């Protein structure tokens, strides 16, 4: 018997992220509009989508203390792009970001 004499409720199992594609199953029109927004594409995996990398990783720059192969995901695309690495189960931002408008590296 559960609290207050009611029936026992099942213990919920841990939930997992199902991804945005799961929303499309019931809300295709909303999903299609959302998918074209900047926010839907702000975080990208450069291994899966190398075309999203905007920073210049070919010319040496003292601000850039990391290589593209160290990047777990990119964040941003219109004004600036930041780069994150993964250590264990955590993500950390690198100390340089790409200034898209001016085509140069800046401290972060």
Image (cartoon, grey):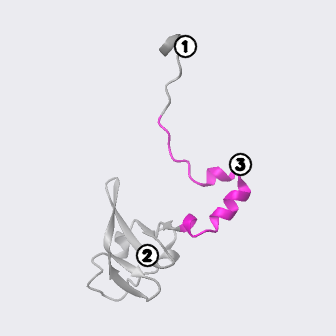
Q: In this view, does 45 lie above or below 30?
A: below
Count the labels in the image: 3
**Element assignment for label 1:** loop
Judged by depth in the image, the label closer to the viewer, 3 or 1, is 1
Q: Nearer the viewer, residue 28 or 48?
A: 28
Residue for point 63% across, 64% down: 35
Q: What stretch is highlighted in magenta?
A: 14-41
Please tell me which of labels 3 and 1 falls first in the chain. 1
Q: Quadrant of residue 102?
A: bottom left
**Within 10 angstroms of label 2, few (less than 14), some, or many (20 or more) residues?**
many
- Considering every residue shown, the one lying at the far right of the view is 29
Q: In which quarter of the image is residue 105?
A: bottom left
Query: Between residues 40 and 73, which one lies in front from this camera angle?
Result: 40
Are the residues tagged 3 and 1 within 8 Å (C-beta)?
no
Residue bearing mark 3: 26
Residue 72, image x and y in percent?
Answer: 40, 65
Q: In terms of sequence position, does the residue under pointer 3 or pointer 2 come before the other?
A: 3
Answer yes or no: is residue 71 visible: yes
The residues bearing labels 3 and 2 have C-alpha atoms spaced at a distance of 33 Å
Do we see residue 2 in this rendering? no
Magenta span contains residue 70: no
**Above-or-below relation of 86 to 5:** below
Label 2 belongs to which residue? 81
Q: Is mark 2 on a helix, strand or loop?
A: strand
**Pair 2/1: label in front:** 1
Please provide percent x and percent y for residue 71: 38, 69
In this figure, which residue is indicated by the disc labeled 1? 6
Gap between marks 3 and 1, in whole Å? 34 Å
Residue shown at 59% from the left, 54% from the top: 20
Quarter occupied by residue 83: bottom left
């Amino acid at each position: 018997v559960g609290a207050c004499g009611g029936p026992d409720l099942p213990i919920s199992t841990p939930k997992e992220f199902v991804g945005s594609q799961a929303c499309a199953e019931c809300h295709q029109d909303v999903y299609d509009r959302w998918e074209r927004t900047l926010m839907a594409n702000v975080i990208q995996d450069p291994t899966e989508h190398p075309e999203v990398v905007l920073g210049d990783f070919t010319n040496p720059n003292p601000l850039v203390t990391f290589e593209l192969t160290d990047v777990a995901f990119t964040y941003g695309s219109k004004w600036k792009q930041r780069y994150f690495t993964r250590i264990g189960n955590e993500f950390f931002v690198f100390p340089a970001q790409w200034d898209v408008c001016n085509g140069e590296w800046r401290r972060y």
